[in-house]
Image (tube, coloured by chain):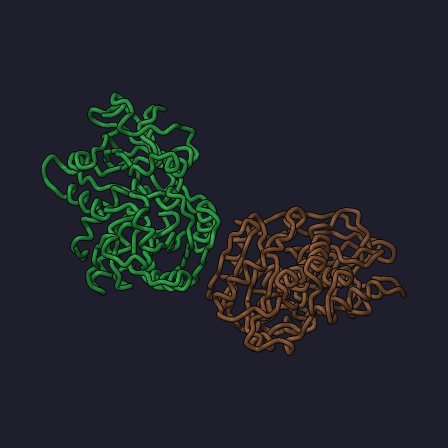
Chain colours: A green, B brown
Amino acid sequence: MFLNGELVPTLAKGCAVLGAGGGGETRTGTLSAQQALIDHGSVPLVDVDELPEHGIVMPIGVIGAPTIGLEKLPDLGAARRLRGEVERRMGAPVVAVMASEIGGSNGLLPLAWAADLGLPVLDADSTGRAFPEVQQVAMHVAGLKPELIALTDTGGNVVVLHVVSGEWAERLGRNVAVTFGGCATMVDYPMRLALARDVVLHGTVSLAMRIGSALEAGGDGPVSNLVAELGARRLIDGKVADVERRLSGGFVRGSATIEGGGADAGRLLRLEIQNENLAAFDNGRVLATVPDLICVLDAHTGEAIATEVLRYGQRVAVIAFPCHPIWRTPRGLDTAGPRAFGLDLDYVPVEDIEEATCV
Amino acid sequence: MFLNGELVPTLAKGCAVLGAGGGGETRTGTLSAQQALIDHGSVPLVDVDELPEHGIVMPIGVIGAPTIGLEKLPDLGAARRLRGEVERRMGAPVVAVMASEIGGSNGLLPLAWAADLGLPVLDADSTGRAFPEVQQVAMHVAGLKPELIALTDTGGNVVVLHVVSGEWAERLGRNVAVTFGGCATMVDYPMRLALARDVVLHGTVSLAMRIGSALEAGGDGPVSNLVAELGARRLIDGKVADVERRLSGGFVRGSATIEGGGADAGRLLRLEIQNENLAAFDNGRVLATVPDLICVLDAHTGEAIATEVLRYGQRVAVIAFPCHPIWRTPRGLDTAGPRAFGLDLDYVPVEDIEEATCV
């Protein structure tokens, strides 16, 4: 299968949903990917088995606070600078680009980088969603240490990290991104295909395409289509009553309040945010938490609204659906469960939370 | 000439003076260098001409706030981790270690690292003193861009910077040091000897030895010996009346007030500090500024007191003496003159400042 500019809007809708509020709003990512696919031609979407085992897959994405991306355009030359570092250090050719996270703009920009490099995109990613921190990836859950991490800014600086743990990758990578002005393009955990095969989350680009297609289908309307496609819980229908959002330590942090309407009149849903939607509370009762995905959808189009563009008055539906199973393992929860984000909550899978609390 | 443990205390006295308050107090540096020279044997002190042109000289030192060094011992294994990076990236062997700055502990620790690596120490450095910022080195004044900069912490993390300018080296290197807990061991501007020959400041280890020897000689007393050796101005004799010192952005910043005694009774000298002593004022009148060296000396031993151990009640003499001529060039002053530190002052060479203002 080839990815071309016409498929990008559908893919973007799926990536926005899988972003769980994060990964960067998809408007500039859509335009950047489309332009790159026009400039360089379409990009093959491939599975691990189509690539040589000795070759390297290069997971890539933007690290930083998504709000920065509202003013700073993606760095489309970044992949070239970073590929050189990866190949020099690892002594093998990069044979495919992969999204570090399929969520948000970070699911789209790898198309642009792959087109620029003349490489295919792997139908896989490292998270199956978007997460704010560097070590919140499948490779860390699998117990791997990043062989190298490389970051670059639009000015042409390149920083290479050789770290003793994923947590150090986050500390150092975050501070480098902040020093670069709030965001950076990063390659993290580049791997031989022989290793990647057993670790990455397969089929997530295709999943994003399916989600996008469900939103574009007719029938009962986009939100209902999406709920059916994902097996999601619909947490509330209403409007955004309040957003508190700030830049802090290279993240967007804050919270949002959704005021119920219609059948949900009188209810208030509170969302806690760190780049992504971390948890949803109804009058202090937990409705859903990381690592499950919580999405704020436009009530009419069903399109997911990123945390950095959430604002007062938007008519929305909030849904939640299960994360990839690796995040529900003990090490998955250590890495990206509620306590990994400082939330003093035990994780309960969203489908097990008492039905009565949902719509 | 060989440097052995017995010479270290003399060298340390010289390095403390050339530190101009910075480069780290020399007590732990002295002990570390002595121990390494016992463990690994003495280290040759060599000139550029004794080394192969194609080989690499590795300038090395500690970056960060000197106060951190009061609690965190030097990382004696750091040079091994950094040499590997340098050789891999530059494709040539490291044949000598050089102090990035001869001032303070940073003039002593290269002996320990050289001993550990089994390499000679070059009789040279990049500053002829100590300066707080990464780009404040002779290579930057010569218009060179660092080919690479590598930092490491005691935990074994290594960060490699490929930067577009010395200023970016400072921004990124500083933030990495802060992320590492306030300090890091850094190799900056490693170079082929063929290039280093024309750029580094030659003979500065020997200079530090001469200064240390002058302090140890009898005669008129250590402070007077030193003033004669250096052609220094004696700015005030008195005691430390006040010190204001804080950690800020990976630097020690603050000021100190020296209250005159004896012939200087009634005078107050104020020192502005950013790791090093930046400027000395007498009732608002400038007595000396960077890039010239301002040193606070113990009134009895003549030994220089680092800014991080300056404290109320110390009996001191403050002296100032001319910097290396490269710092008085236009680009030298752009890099490390008063305005480079945010001081709204024109530079006047210390020897040209009106005699009447000095003792």
- Residue drawn at (42%, 33%) of the image: A339
Give whichever of A182, B3 is nearer the camera. Answer: B3
Give whichever of A246, B299 is nearer the camera. Answer: B299
Give whichever of A154, A147 is nearer the camera. Answer: A147
Horizontal and vertical percent position of residue B219? 90, 66
Horizontal and vertical percent position of residue A178? 45, 51
- Residue drawn at (53%, 73%) of the image: B143
- Residue drawn at (39%, 54%) of the image: A184
Q: Quadrant of the N terminus of chain B?
A: bottom right
Examine the rendering and report whether any part of residue A36 can be seen. Answer: yes
- Residue drawn at (23%, 56%) of the image: A50
Q: Residue furthest left?
A: A219
Q: Is residue B287 left or right of residue A14?
A: right
B109 shown above or below A345: below
Horizontal and vertical percent position of residue A259? 28, 29
B30 shown above or below A339: below
Examine the rendering and report whether any part of residue B280 can be seen. Answer: no
Q: Is residue A93 left or right of residue B231?
A: left
B195 shown above or below A143: below
Tell me how many marks there are: 0
B52 shown above or below B34: below
